[in-house]
Image (cartoon, rainbow, N blue to C red):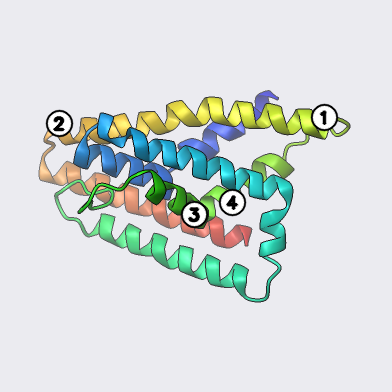
């Protein structure tokens, strides 16, 4: 169970669309304004996990071309976000926020987020804790995942809000943008490998 918990922590703290958009929302609108968005990500993440556990995601991905189409669209979207971040220059811009995204935007993001499916599949099928007690295992995994998920995402929201207040020099802001873009590309690579 310790290995599973450590894997959850590593998979959830790595940048993906959910955490990067959460940090961007915090940077654009502040910590408290991001709470509904984080709530939407939470609901969306758990819906994706339910789809993975129930086999619904596996069934949907068997439809001719659907898996490839969704992976292609998600990959292109993530590459687009990475380019926007890397080319933002000297303004920290995890994701430029023209209008504050809310609860439903976050639920939708998780539904098309390839990292969410990769993480769900990895955690629910890659770590067998009790092969003879599937229901108990699934409930314990959901509990552990959510106990880690909540503080991680609020941490990213707080980080975004804090970066806005730092007023960093342009060179440091540019370095942060490039590091975030590289992280997004790594997420795209992991999603493509898992497909």
**Which mark, residue 113?**
3
Q: How crowded is mark 2: few (under 14 residues within 10 Å), some or many (20 or more)?
A: few
Mark 3 → mark 1, Cα distance in angstroms: 29 Å
Secondary structure beneath dot 3 equals loop
Mark 3 → mark 4, Cα distance in angstroms: 7 Å
- Identify whether 126 is placed above or below 153: below
Residue 167 locus on image (x, y percent): 11, 35
Mark 4 → mark 1, Cα distance in angstroms: 22 Å
The residue where tag 4 is placed is 117
Marks 3 and 2 in Cβ contact (< 8 Å): no
Marks 3 and 4 in Cβ contact (< 8 Å): yes
The residue where tag 2 is placed is 165
Residue 117 locus on image (x, y percent): 59, 51
Q: Which of marks 3 and 2 is in front?
A: 3
Q: Which of 48 and 118 lies nearest the eye of the viewer? A: 48
In which quadrant of the rendered view does residue 53 lie?
top right
Marks 4 and 1 in Cβ contact (< 8 Å): no
The residue where tag 1 is placed is 130
Secondary structure beneath dot 2 equals helix
């Amino acid at each position: 169970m310790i290995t599973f918990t450590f894997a959850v922590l590593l998979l959830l703290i790595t940048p993906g669309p959910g955490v990067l958009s959460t940090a961007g929302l915090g940077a654009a609108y502040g910590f408290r304004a991001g709470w509904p968005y984080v709530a939407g990500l939470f609901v969306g993440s758990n819906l994706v996990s339910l789809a993975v556990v129930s086999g619904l995601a596996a069934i949907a991905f068997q439809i001719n071309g659907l898996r490839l189409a969704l992976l292609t669209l998600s990959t292109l979207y993530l590459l687009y976000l990475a380019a926007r971040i890397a080319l933002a220059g000297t303004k920290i811009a995890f994701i430029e926020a023209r209008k504050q995204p809310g609860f439903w935007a976050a639920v939708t993001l998780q539904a098309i987020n390839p990292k969410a499916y990769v993480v769900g599949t990895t955690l629910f099928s890659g770590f067998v804790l009790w092969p003879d007690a599937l229901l108990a295992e699934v409930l314990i995994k959901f509990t552990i995942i959510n106990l880690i998920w909540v503080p991680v995402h609020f941490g990213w929201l707080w980080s975004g809000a804090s970066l806005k207040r730092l007023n960093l020099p342009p060179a440091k802001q540019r370095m942060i943008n490039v590091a975030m873009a590289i992280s997004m590309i790594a997420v795209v690579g992991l999603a493509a490998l898992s497909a």
